[in-house]
Image (cartoon, grey):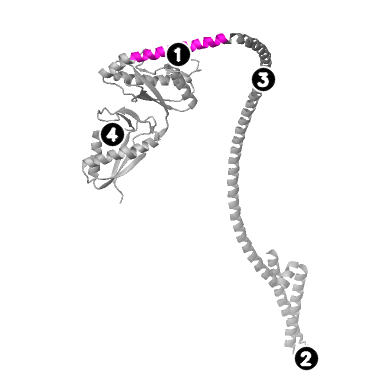
């Protein structure tokens, strides 16, 4: 900028100087009346003034160009510089746009970098947490390895003890073999006496069994038979007395108490029917069972059978339903002989689950509708209950004309409830769909409670 001002100033001053010098030369030459090339003095003065002005301007411009290199570039390359300037301006604008795009991208990159940094810090936190958990696990593994090493050491000691015991056992076996050799020699001498003693023992056992059977038959014939003839039975053979669920436990004593608790419930039910309490403190008795030959005892008592049932439940590892069934007909004033039937207590129905559905014509009379509903319950609903392993309740029909007094009942449906259900069907009218659903979650032990839905049948 400064150079341009200096150049313009020199140019203005030089122009003024050229005008002054030209005017001065022109006046002098005009006064001198000089001629050049045959021209008139006035024209000669104009020519000399013009040439002098051109020479002064040339010298001035030459001095300026010689002394200022940028000025030379402006004079000789001005247009090219202007063109390059325009090109550079366009490039500058393009670079500015590129710069703005890059700045936006850089801003996005910075945002992504900050987000990545935040995620990295979060990952670092999770890594530290995982490393802490890994360290805790490593510590636990180290402790367990120490315990395992200690257990291995104990096992080694026990193995050494076992080897010592085995060595002692070998010595004892050798001694035993020697003693057995002597025993066989002695047994050869006593074999005949032992056979005779065994035959005598068998005869004594058989005699005791015959005596027990005779005594039992005598007691039944004198007491129970007369009672059954003269008194109404409070329980029929095969009828269910009670039932209960024994929850699984690995503790034998807990399982036994649960079994005894179910027997106590059966005792209360028997007492309600008029049974008397036996010597075991309950009104129900599990009769003794004669043991098979070689069992080590003559019979299995009630206590033996309870313990066997306890062991079976513990070994099975699941909940069990105990169904108490009358073994024989019984009369009031006597304890009830029973047998215990164990069943697995499986899940049967969920609350609200549909067992079966049927379609009914509500325009029919109430008697026909009741018959259709009873048939639906006795077939479809009963079959579904049987398929789901629901344990039926064995009850007596108490109908003298019924040839099969014992009935398996999976659910209860009295006349009042049946009449109400028939009325619901009639009120709905037309073709209806009747569905039976479980009123609550139900296992094999039951009881199965039913609720019914009545809605118009789909066309």
**Disc 3 + disc 4, Cβ < 8 Å:** no
Disc on res. 159 = 3
Q: Nearer the viewer, mark 3 or mark 2?
A: 3
Q: Nearer the viewer, mark 2 or mark 4?
A: 4
Q: Nearer the viewer, mark 1 or mark 3?
A: 1
Figure quadrant of residue 300? top left
C-alpha span from label 2 to label 1: 187 Å
User: Is 205 contained in the magenta span?
Assistant: yes
Residue linked to disc 2: 38
Indicate the position of residue 291 as horizontal and vertical percent values. Answer: 46, 18
Q: Secondary structure at mark 1?
A: helix
Question: Which residues, given as a range, are shown in magenta?
Answer: 192-219
Q: In the rendered image, which quarter contains the N terminus?
A: bottom right
* Nearer the observer, 350 or 171: 171
C-alpha span from label 3 to label 2: 151 Å
Residue linked to disc 1: 206
Q: Is the residue marked by circle 2 packed among few (<14), some (14-19), or many (20+) residues within 10 Å?
A: few
* Nearer the observer, 180 or 143: 180
Residue 12 visible = no
Figure quadrant of residue 238? top left
Q: Earlier in the sequence, mark 3 or mark 2?
A: 2
Q: Earlier in the sequence, mark 4 or mark 1?
A: 1
Q: Earlier in the sequence, mark 3 or mark 4?
A: 3
Q: Earlier in the sequence, mark 1 or mark 3?
A: 3
Q: Secondary structure at mark 2?
A: loop
Residue linked to disc 4: 413
């Amino acid at each position: 900028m400064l150079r341009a001002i200096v150049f313009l100033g020199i140019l203005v001053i030089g122009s003024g100087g050229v005008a002054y010098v030209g005017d001065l030369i022109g006046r002098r030459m005009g006064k001198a009346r000089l001629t050049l090339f045959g021209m008139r003095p006035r024209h000669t003065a104009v020519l000399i003034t013009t040439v002098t002005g051109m020479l002064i301007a040339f010298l001035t411009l030459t001095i300026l160009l010689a002394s200022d290199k940028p000025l030379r570039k402006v004079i000789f390359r001005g247009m090219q510089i202007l063109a390059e300037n325009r090109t550079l301006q366009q490039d500058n604008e393009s670079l500015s746009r590129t710069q703005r795009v890059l700045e936006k991208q850089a801003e996005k990159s910075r945002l992504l970098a900050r987000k990545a940094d935040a995620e990295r810090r979060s990952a670092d936190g999770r890594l530290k947490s995982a490393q802490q958990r890994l360290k805790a696990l490593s510590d636990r593994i180290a402790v367990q390895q120490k315990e395992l090493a200690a257990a291995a050491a104990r096992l080694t000691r026990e193995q050494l003890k076992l080897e010592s015991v085995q060595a002692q056992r070998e010595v004892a076996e050798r001694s035993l073999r020697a003693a057995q050799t002597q025993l066989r020699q002695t047994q050869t001498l006593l074999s005949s006496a032992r056979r005779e003693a065994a035959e005598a023992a068998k005869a004594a056992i058989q005699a005791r069994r015959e005596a027990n059977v005779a005594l039992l038959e005598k007691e039944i014939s004198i007491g129970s038979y007369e009672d059954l003839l003269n008194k109404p039975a409070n329980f029929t053979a095969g009828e269910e007395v009670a039932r209960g669920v024994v929850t699984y436990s690995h503790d034998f004593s807990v399982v036994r108490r649960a079994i005894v608790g179910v027997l106590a419930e059966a005792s209360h039910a028997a007492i309600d029917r008029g049974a008397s309490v036996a010597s075991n403190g309950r009104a129900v008795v599990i009769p003794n069972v004669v043991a098979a030959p070689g069992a080590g005892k003559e019979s299995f008592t009630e206590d033996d059978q309870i313990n066997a049932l306890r062991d079976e439940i513990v070994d099975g590892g699941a909940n069990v339903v105990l169904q108490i069934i009358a073994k024989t007909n019984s009369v009031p004033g006597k304890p009830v002989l029973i047998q215990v039937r164990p069943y697995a207590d499986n899940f049967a129905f969920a609350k609200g689950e549909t067992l079966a559905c049927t379609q009914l014509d509500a325009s029919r009379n109430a008697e026909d509708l009741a018959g259709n509903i009873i048939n639906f319950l006795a077939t479809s609903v009963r079959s579904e209950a049987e398929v789901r392993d629901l344990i039926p309740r064995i009850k007596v029909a108490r109908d003298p004309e019924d040839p099969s007094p014992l009935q398996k009942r999976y659910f209860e449906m009295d006349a009042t409830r049946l009449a109400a259900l028939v009325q619901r069907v009639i009120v709905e009218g037309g073709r209806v769909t009747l569905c039976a659903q479980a009123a609550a979650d139900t296992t094999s032990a039951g009881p199965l409670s039913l609720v019914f839905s009545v809605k118009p049948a789909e066309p």
